[in-house]
Amino acid sequence: MRAVRTVLGDVPPDRLGVCDAHDHLFLRSPALPGHELDDPAAAAAELATFRELGGGTLVQWTPFGMGRAAGELPALSRAAGVHLVAATGLHQAAHYAPGLLERLRGGGLAAFFTAELTEGMLTGDDPDGPRGPARAGMVKVAGMFHGLDGHAREVMAAAAEAHHATGAPIGVHHEMGTAAADVLALLTGQLGVPAASVLLGHLNRFPDPGLHRELAASGAYLAFDGPSRAHHATDWRLLGCLEDLAAAGHADQLLIGGDTTSATARAATGGGPGVPYLLRVLRPRIAAALGEDAAAALFVRNPARAFAWA
């Protein structure tokens, strides 16, 4: 039997409903000063609007050490009536204060990720802090721009160990949508992670249909996220990329997410597209371009498979 691990416990995949497959309710990084997502009330407002529009599940890809507010997530989930899937794992080294990564490595990254998946997540950003009852449902890792550095390889190796111990899916941040082939070569080729357990994020930021088809041929999931960001090639090429992949027979491997990464991008408080954009604007456009069945695949059926594990 397979289930999706949410912050309130495991649920059958068919209970997820409409899914925002990649977003952030909380996020903080020294590399992104002034862009903190740290307001529980604003997060609650985004979730409430998402629920009003028919949303059922949001997957927060914020990994450990970046203000993911794991202790806040269960109450937010209950209040909104929205399933929340949280992440363990690590981002690029630049997103962490000096010394934090060394403290984590001392206890073993694979063991740390596995504990957060099976026992409970640390409620704050202190490796020696308390562990809450909410468990992570995925592992987040990150590549670099057109390549992988030593930190990325170390984290991905630990994520692969955690996957083999638990079956949890691995979501990948691709810097500007690049290095996805390098990631697959490492995770699936060298480390033995099944491609169906790998979620390749931000591919809309590198809108190369030929490359997308090559990646899809591996069997991995392709995540298109962060819509309505003028500094990325997103909205005006997104539908074309999705249409190309659907025509090639890969509609059942596509995931859609909002990837809200700053307070100004929130709909409820910042005047941005926010989480509601997916269902208010993007889903109707996808349904019009690809058909209602394809839209149901992207928002309901595909994430139900992608985030489920034994």
Image: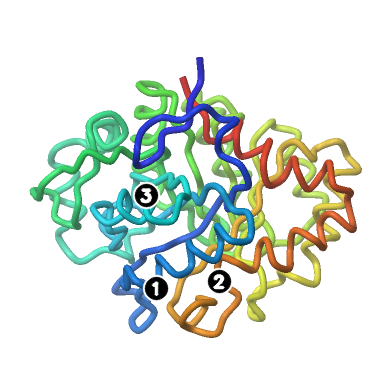
In this image, 96 relative to 233: left or right? left
Q: Is residue 128 visible?
A: yes
Disc 3 marks a residue whose amino acid type is Arg
Disc 2 marks a residue whose amino acid type is Gly
65 or 310: nearer the viewer: 310
Label 2, secondary structure: give it: loop
Q: Which label sits in the foreground, 2 or 3?
A: 3
**What residue do we see at 57% from left, 58% from top?**
146
* Of callouts 3 and 1, the N-terminal one: 1
Label 3 neighbour load within 10 Å: few <14, some 14-19, many 20+: few
For marks 3 and 1, give the CA distance. Answer: 16 Å
For marks 2 and 3, give the CA distance. Answer: 20 Å
The label on residue 274 is: 2
Q: Which label sits in the foreground, 2 or 1?
A: 1
- Across and down, in percent, residue 59 comes to 48, 49
**What residue do we see at 80% from left, 38% from top?**
250
The label on residue 299 is: none
* Residue under pointer 1: 42
Q: Image quadrant of residue 125?
A: bottom left
Q: Image quadrant of residue 239?
A: bottom right
* Residue under pointer 3: 78
Label 2 neighbour load within 10 Å: few <14, some 14-19, many 20+: many
Label 1, secondary structure: give it: helix
- Across and down, in percent, residue 204 comes to 69, 61
Residue farthest toward the top in the current orientation of the protein: 1
**What residue do we see at 48% from left, 62% from top?**
47
